[in-house]
Amino acid sequence: MSVRFACCIAALLATVSPLAAQAGPDPLAPTGRWSAYTRGAAARPPMGWNSWNAFGSGIDERKLLASAQVIVDTGLAAKGYRYIDLDDGWWLRRRTADGRIVIRTANFPSADIGGGETSFRPLTDRLHAMGLKAGIYSDIGRNSCAQMYSSDGLNQPEGNLAEREVGLYDNIDRDIGLYFRDWGFDLIKVDACGIRGLTPDSPWVSSGKMRALGPFIDSESLGRTDISTVRSLYGQVRQALEKYNPDNDFIYSLCLWGSADVRSWAKDTGNISRTSDDIAPTWGRMLHSLDSAARRPLYAHPGSWNDPDMLYIGTGDFDADHLTEARAHFALWAMLSAPLMIGYDLSKAPPALLDIFGNSRVIAVDQDPAGNQAVLAFDTDDLQIFVKTLANGDKAVAVVNRTGGPISGGFTADQLKLLKDADIALTDLWTGEQHSFRGEYKFKLAAHQTLIFTAHGTRRLAGGFYLSETPGIVNPAADGVLVPEEEPLVYRPIFWAGTHGSGEHPRYGGWGGAQPDQTPYGLNLGIGRQRFDTGIGILANSRLEVRNQGHARFSAQVGIDDSARMLSAPATFYVYGDGKLLARSPLMRFGQAPFALSADVRGVKLVELVVRTPTPGIQGRPVTWGEAALLD
Ligand code: GLA
């Protein structure tokens, strides 16, 4: 149904708004504005090198420049690896007279600019002259992670307690100005250890080594985490970055390891955001990082990406003796549209590893301009199939064998949303081999093997795209999750505590978030017993923003999802175009057949899809935008 009179609609909405009784703007009210972060230089996932996985706090200028030089000499820079990031371990102290940070010149000699002053400008000038970009590291608290967790104390800040407070807390504007305006950095990674563990009874505080702060984050409990304070602190860094980078040439990397429900707000705050605790060079920890990002494609867009952590290719389970695992790690990060940050001493890299980092076909999948993170088309603990829609309409498909033994299977045209009775041309991105199939492509995988292809066929939806194929243009501005819950579907390897305690538990907020092709709780989509293999699953009391790039019509089959059971409240579905109501459903109840909703979106830039229940203040049950699509 199409309604023309915006004034009447506004009055109608005021009476049904679930949040009308609450203070502040109604998050379900259409804004006509795409709200995911687009400032900074991250239209594509950042690529480069970071010192941490290779050197830890043992980093120095010589080691950093050696890897930078290999990146230039081997042609990796020309393939997109541009950011050379200095991680933890670079600082000497904060000068208490004026609050200025002093660099450890013993390890970074070019930073000694005379007169007792230090500056990274000579180093960033050098990197810029090599055609590269420069990244630096800090912490949102007063102290950094290595200050708290380093086992050998190597290269940790020196001096009295105040001099050792090198993190951003209380110094955000000063430090960001120093790093970007004065020293010329292009990227900052902002860690969060300083607001996590510094309770009065912690060993660091009780020993007098550090001051207590917060803690605002409790990695094991969203309930004990002060999400709004964490969000506000990271928001202050964003503001400072925008102030000191009027040319927009910056990247803001949030590193709070999936805590503080960052999944729900990072996409509005910065360019990349860590989804998990630290990766380690083991297969299980790689799977953990993978899983922490894999079910969040709707939370990644050009400008704001999920970051499952830096690459560990070259080390441990991903070293030159484990090329199968190294290729799997690389291919999966490309499917996730993850930042590709090499974490290896490239001066030692054998050609086989350089070939992996340099595979242009796989890099192109990561860097595809549409920015659609791959969607899980098939999901089991043993084998997964990821499908990513590329800007030219082709698909990238990756099949991963998570197990330690061989496995066989097949992927279907349906899973690729391609027609099954037409030829599909496949290109193997590792070997360059071409294949062709109809219906189903059978494969055999060795232990830990990932195959990755591009696929060209006939699209199942001629003249349009299902929204679940294009998560890069769909933003769950309000996903209906009022009470953040930990995501249970993340592989749990042994973490820091070893086998002490009761084991690893779910730890990253995100359960119940919006999903392509499945419900917010990972079930098949269905309305009134009609199953949908494509659509967006979301909770009621939600608002999705959808960028329309010239399509004429939006259509969907909407209703309360069958998984909602009898607990469901009824809900109404609304379609807005640039802030104006275009169509709405009747009040939909559990078990009712889907309602066909359709709207003319010609000339509309932003479509908004809103679902409201009449009952204010409750977390909505799953609802389904079945077969939601933008059509020519
Ligand atoms: C944390 C981060 C790592 C690294 C270290 C540095 O653990 O998650 O990526 O930056 O701190 O101390």
Image (cartoon, helix red, strand yellow):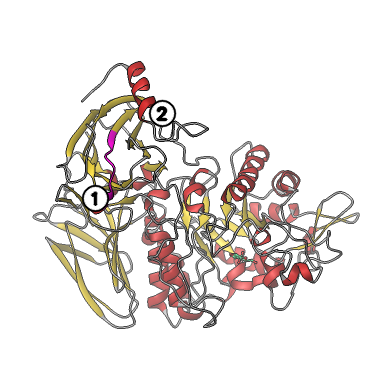
2 or 1: mark nearer the eye = 1
Question: What residue is disc 2 on?
Answer: 32
Indicate yes or no whether the magenta region holds residue 565: yes
Question: What residue is disc 1 on?
Answer: 566
Question: In the structure shown, which secondary structural element does the residue marked by tag 1 occupy?
Answer: helix
The residue located at (14%, 50%) in the rendering is 529
As measured in the structure, the alpha-carbon distance from the residue carrying label 2 to the one carrying label 1 is: 34 Å
What span is in magenta? Answer: 564-573
Residue 341 appears anywhere in the view: yes
Q: Is mark 2 within 8 Å of ligand 1?
A: no
Above or below residue 391? Residue 106 is below
Where's the N terminus, which quadrant? top left
501 or 79, which is in the foreground? 501
The x and y percentages for residue 247 are 61, 37
Figure quadrant of residue 17: top left
Indicate yes or no whether the magenta region holds residue 239: no
The x and y percentages for residue 126 are 69, 55
490 or 89, which is in the foreground? 490
Could you tell me how many numbered marks the image carries? 2
Residue 627 appears anywhere in the view: no
The x and y percentages for residue 284 are 43, 76
Q: Amino acid at mark 1?
A: Met
472 or 393, which is in the foreground? 472
